[in-house]
Amino acid sequence: EMADMIAASRSFQLNAEMANTAKSMMQRLLTLGQ
């Protein structure tokens, strides 16, 4: 049970980091396109 919680929070953390990276990349592309 505890291990499942840890694995879930870890994958959530990875997803959040990937979302942040994708967002910053999109913003960089937008500024380049201007």
Image (cartoon, helix red, strand yellow):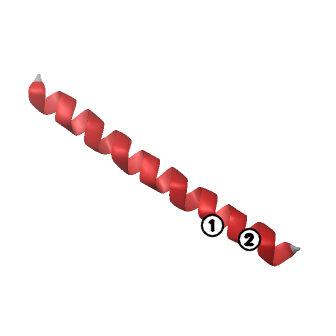
Quarter that holds the C terminus: bottom right
List the residue tagged with mark 2.
29
The residue that appears at 61% across and 63% down in the rendered structure is 24
The residue that appears at 43% across and 54% down in the rendered structure is 17
The residue that appears at 45% across and 47% down in the rendered structure is 16
Residue 13 location in percent, x, y? Answer: 35, 45
Looking at the rendered structure, the kind of residue marked 1 is Met
Residue density around tag 2, few if under 14, some if 14–19, many if 20 or more, within 10 Å: few
- Residue 13 falls left or right of residue 4: right
* Farthest right residue in view: 34
List the residue tagged with mark 1.
25
- Residue 19 falls left or right of residue 27: left
Q: Secondary structure at mark 1?
A: helix
Query: 17 and 1: which one is in front?
Result: 17
The numbered disc on residue 8 is none
Residue 5 location in percent, x, y? Answer: 20, 29
Q: Secondary structure at mark 2?
A: helix
**In this view, 13 is above or below 6:** below
For the residues bearing labels 2 and 1, Cβ distance under 8 angstroms:
yes
Quarter that holds the N terminus: top left
